[in-house]
Amino acid sequence: MKRLSVKDIINSPLAVSTEKGEMVFKTINSHLQNNEKVIIDFKGIDLMITAFLNAAIGKLYGNKSYSSQFLNDHIKLDNIEKEDISLFKDVIERAKEYFEDKEAFENDANEMLYGKD
Amino acid sequence: MKIKIPNKITSELYGYNQIIRFIKNASDIKNTTIELDFELVSFLEANLCAVLGVCFEILEKNGNEIKLINLQPKVERIMRKNTFLIKYGYEALNDFYQTTITYQKFTPDNDEGFNNYITQQLLAMPGFPSHSKALGKAILRNIFEIFENARTHGSCEYIHTCGQYFPKKTDKPLHFTIVDKGVNIQENVRDYLKKNIKADEAIKWAMQKGNTTKVGDTSGGLGLNVIFEFIKLNNGKIQVISADGFYEFDKGEERVTLMSSTFSGTIVNLRFNLADSNSYYLEGEELDDDIIF
């Protein structure tokens, strides 16, 4: 498994912006696209906010080919501080809801435009 | 032209009504020299210099030249310590007890600058909770969440910030204010929901977990709620003023109302209780290695 250091990717101990989350997402995604397994290592990250995690991790749910099982098989998280655990849980739960709603909305919109399959 | 600054610049509804009405009236003044008369200002919550900063930004953008006059000694002292007055010809004053977080304004793309500002000033503050790493981290997270909100939702030119700490008070309160003059919450929520909504209801909607006006390939809707949940536990305060909406959660009580004037942007004022002895993670909480996603 390939170890990805978040601190090295964003070049900072502060994971506090959407843009930095995007950098992590791009790195993870490039490995997943090649069906490679990764360990996302948060060692050295002093602070994280929801906007960062939404972009880094939550955005993975936007790719329909990444099921929960696929993500669980291909991604391990390491060195998460105890204080940040609830943040991860909230972000993942919220991302699942967001992209399920988005899909339902898009299906309704398509049905309206093109009729039922 | 001489204009009197309102007498109390404080974080009560009355104080916000006064300063926001002042800002709205001042927005019409263009291309002149203005003497801002502080004669009536007997008290100023120093962190609200972030609101004054926006006011002065508007005046200067309208081609006005600003001079400050008749500052009372106590008010002048604190505004020199937090460096707000430096631009207007006053000398800085040493913040011997390191209780101020200086007034600054940031462009939205300067998140590194904001990072440095907060880590250098807040973490260097004596008394910034040494008894609880988790508390300190939670406070920092809250501040960065608000800044990120202003960056991504406000579409503004500048974000103004300022803070003040009171280590001798029982709760050791740390006040921090972030202000942007950009797209306000009512506009964002109205555009997203595609229906009219009052400004106070819009703020209340935005505070709820899962509600976001972000669209696209990234989820959202957690930031304000994370702050709200923390403030509840910490026995702190959060105030959000946007358009003519006023939202406050203070010591367990929520208040939502409309103001008598409108602010074209968003003010977030936070009070953290640094004497808080709660722990901020659940003992034994873990992420299951196999079933995270």
Image (cartoon, coloured by chain):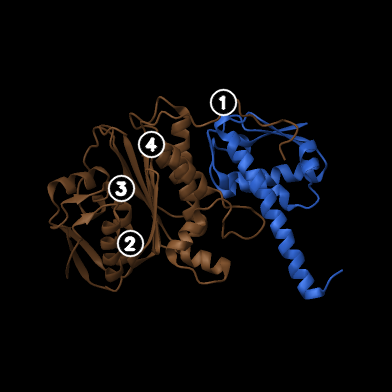
Chain colours: A blue, B brown
Mark 2 neighbour density, 10 Å: few (under 14) some (14–19) many (20 or more): some
Q: CA distance from mark 2 to mark 3?
A: 17 Å
Q: Look at mark 2 in the image and give the residue it sits on.
A: B57
- Residue B119 circle label: none
Question: Does residue B248 appear left or right of residue A45 in this picture?
Answer: left
Q: Horizontal and vertical percent for residue B83?
A: 27, 46
Whether pointer 1 and pointer 2 mark residues with C-beta atoms closer than 8 Å, the reply is no
Q: Look at mark 4 in the image and give the residue it sits on.
A: B122
In front: mark 1 or mark 4?
A: 1
Question: Does residue B24 appear left or right of residue B71 in this picture?
Answer: right
Type of amino acid at the residue the image marks with label 2: Glu
Q: Tell me, yes or no, whether dots 2 and 3 are on the same chain.
A: yes
Tell me which numbered mark, 3 or 1, is placed earlier along the sequence: 3
Question: Does residue B10 appear left or right of residue B292 in this picture?
Answer: left
Vertical position of residue A90 compared to residue B169: above or below: below
In front: mark 2 or mark 3?
A: 3
Q: Look at mark 1 in the image and give the residue it sits on.
A: B283
Q: Horizontal and vertical percent for residue B272?
A: 38, 39
Kindly identify which chain the residue marked by label 3 belongs to.
Answer: B
Type of amino acid at the residue the image marks with label 3: Asn
Tell me which numbered mark, 3 or 4, is placed earlier along the sequence: 3
The residue lying at 43 percent from left, 62 percent from top is B200
Q: What secondary structure is marked by label 4? A: helix
Kindly identify which chain the residue marked by label 1 belongs to.
Answer: B
Tell me which numbered mark, 4 or 2, is placed earlier along the sequence: 2
Mark 1 neighbour density, 10 Å: few (under 14) some (14–19) many (20 or more): few
Whether pointer 3 and pointer 4 mark residues with C-beta atoms closer than 8 Å, the reply is no
Q: CA distance from mark 3 to mark 1?
A: 35 Å
